[in-house]
């Protein structure tokens, strides 16, 4: 086609050449199609809410200070954590976390569920590996510079949960999101720096990748035992430590495997600290007054209106004002107000029968004091918590 050929002439010419090539008969093999029958929604009552920390570094990460394994576990227990994953940089031990963090004599607890994991620290960015039991992390480390197709097959063989860490900015996760189960949408107490991570999460959800959003403090530094042990980074322990933020999971049992499973299926919300209210997000599919699904769940849209309910459980400030922002398919859907006494809002919408729809919520309100990490309040500001999405028509076999 000559560049001189413009306007109506160009359009006509293109149409003719298109049909001449048989393009009208073209069928998009990837077009949205009916997802068929989806697996049934799990029980909303048969389970337990567990809170924990999914990204923290001990002395086995060389740039950490005053942060031995025993201190992290004792602190986690003291603030009521149910589970914990210490995620040391694997490159600092040449991939051998199994004989460093996991065999540390202090790596034990009678009350906190300890997950096995590490921060996969590569030239293409960072990801966390999570597992209920020991696995051959060395294999994941060894393939870090391979192509995604190799990494993905090793990850599958290891049976681990892989999570993209701090996905925007320094050391952003530079691998395909097709092989991860979750994404760190809230890294550290400094809430405002997570905006781009949230944007990436929405892009992944919108494209059909049902990734769980999770939190992680990424704390490296503990409070020095004596003043002479202080480092230039010791100030961080008062601002960002275990639980800033805290990731809640609705697990079918108080076991490490149930925590991992809940993380994978998305029955997860994130709170600014262990004492802040927990965000719960439910949907009543048939409007019979009984909730049928919660965040992380995926149902087929019937074309009928669905009633949604957001509630805050735990330490709300009774007279405090809370704002619930609902995001639908990556865009603002509505803003709702409640107070700490009611601590709930409801809204109704009809998810499309064709194609995917998701809803997630962000809750802002009065900060909750965290006396053990006193300066974290100012960094998380009004951010109380966020939910995972409630999904419709997502392909479980994507
Ligand atoms: Zn990192
Ligand atoms: Zn880290």
Image (cartoon, rainbow, N blue to C red):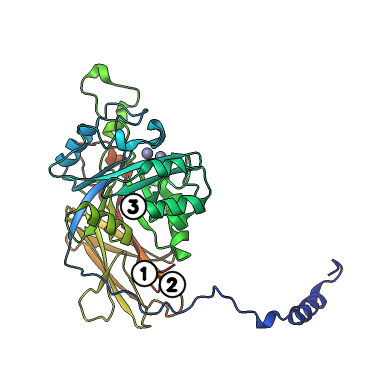
In 3D space, how far apart are the residues under numbered discs 1 and 2 (Cα atoms)?
7 Å
Can you tell me which quadrant of the image ligand 2 is in?
top left
Which image quadrant is residue 62 in? Answer: top left
Q: On screen, 259 above or below 229?
A: below
In this view, the residue in front, 177 or 148, is: 148
Q: On screen, 58 above or below 228?
A: below
Indicate which disc, 1 or 2, sits on the residue closer to the N terminus.
2
User: Are dots 1 and 2 in contact, CB under 8 Å?
Assistant: yes
Q: Residue at x 30, y 34 (%)?
A: 99
User: Are dots 3 and 1 in contact, CB under 8 Å?
Assistant: no
Indicate which disc, 3 or 1, sits on the residue closer to the N terminus.
3
Q: Residue at x 23, y 57 (%)?
A: 258
In 3D space, how far apart are the residues under numbered discs 3 and 2 (Cα atoms)?
22 Å
Residue 123: give x, y in percent of width and height.
50, 39
Residue 325: give x, y in percent of width and height.
35, 61
Q: Secondary structure at mark 1?
A: strand
Q: Residue at x 39, y 36 (%)?
A: 95
The image quadrant where one finds the N terminus is bottom right
Q: Which residue is mark 3?
A: 214
Q: Residue at x 36, y 47 (%)?
A: 129
Question: What is the number of the mark on residue 247?
Answer: none
């Amino acid at each position: 086609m000559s560049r001189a050929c413009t306007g109506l002439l160009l359009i006509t010419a293109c149409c003719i050449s298109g049909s001449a090539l048989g393009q009208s008969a073209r069928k998009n093999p990837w077009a949205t199609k009916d997802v068929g029958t989806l697996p049934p929604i799990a029980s909303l009552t048969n389970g337990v809410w567990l809170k924990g920390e999914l990204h923290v570094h001990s002395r086995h990460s060389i740039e950490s200070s005053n942060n031995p394994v025993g201190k992290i576990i004792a602190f986690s227990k003291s603030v009521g954590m149910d589970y914990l994953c210490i995620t040391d940089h694997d490159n600092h031990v040449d991939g051998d976390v199994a004989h460093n963090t996991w065999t540390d004599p202090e790596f034990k607890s009678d009350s906190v569920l300890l997950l096995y994991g590490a921060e996969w620290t590569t030239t293409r960015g960072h990801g966390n590996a999570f597992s209920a039991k020991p696995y051959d992390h060395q294999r994941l480390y060894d393939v870090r510079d391979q192509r995604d197709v190799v990494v993905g097959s090793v990850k599958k063989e290891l049976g681990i949960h892989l999570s993209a860490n701090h996905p925007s900015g320094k050391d952003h996760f530079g691998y395909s999101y097709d092989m991860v189960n979750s994404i760190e949408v809230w890294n550290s107490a400094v809430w405002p720096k997570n905006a781009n991570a949230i944007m990436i999460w929405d892009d992944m959800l919108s494209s059909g990748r049902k990734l769980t959003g999770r939190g992680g403090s990424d704390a490296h530094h503990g409070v020095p035992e004596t003043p002479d042990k202080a480092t230039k980074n010791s100030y961080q322990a008062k601002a960002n430590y275990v639980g800033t933020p805290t990731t809640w999971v609705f697990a079918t049992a108080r076991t490490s495997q149930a925590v991992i499973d809940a993380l994978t299926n998305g029955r997860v919300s994130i709170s600014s600290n262990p004492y802040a209210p927990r965000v719960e997000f439910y949907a009543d599919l048939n409007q019979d007054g009984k909730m049928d699904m919660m965040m992380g769940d995926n149902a087929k849209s019937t074309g009928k209106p669905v009633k949604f309910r957001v509630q805050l459980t735990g330490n709300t400030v009774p007279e405090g004002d809370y704002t619930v922002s609902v995001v639908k398919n990556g865009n603002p859907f509505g803003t709702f107000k409640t107070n700490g006494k009611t601590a709930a809002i409801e809204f109704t919408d009809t998810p499309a029968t064709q194609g995917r729809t998701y809803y997630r919520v962000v809750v802002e309100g009065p900060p909750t004091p965290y006396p053990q990490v006193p300066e974290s309040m100012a960094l998380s500001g009004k951010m109380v918590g966020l939910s995972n999405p409630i999904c419709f028509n997502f392909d479980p076999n994507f």
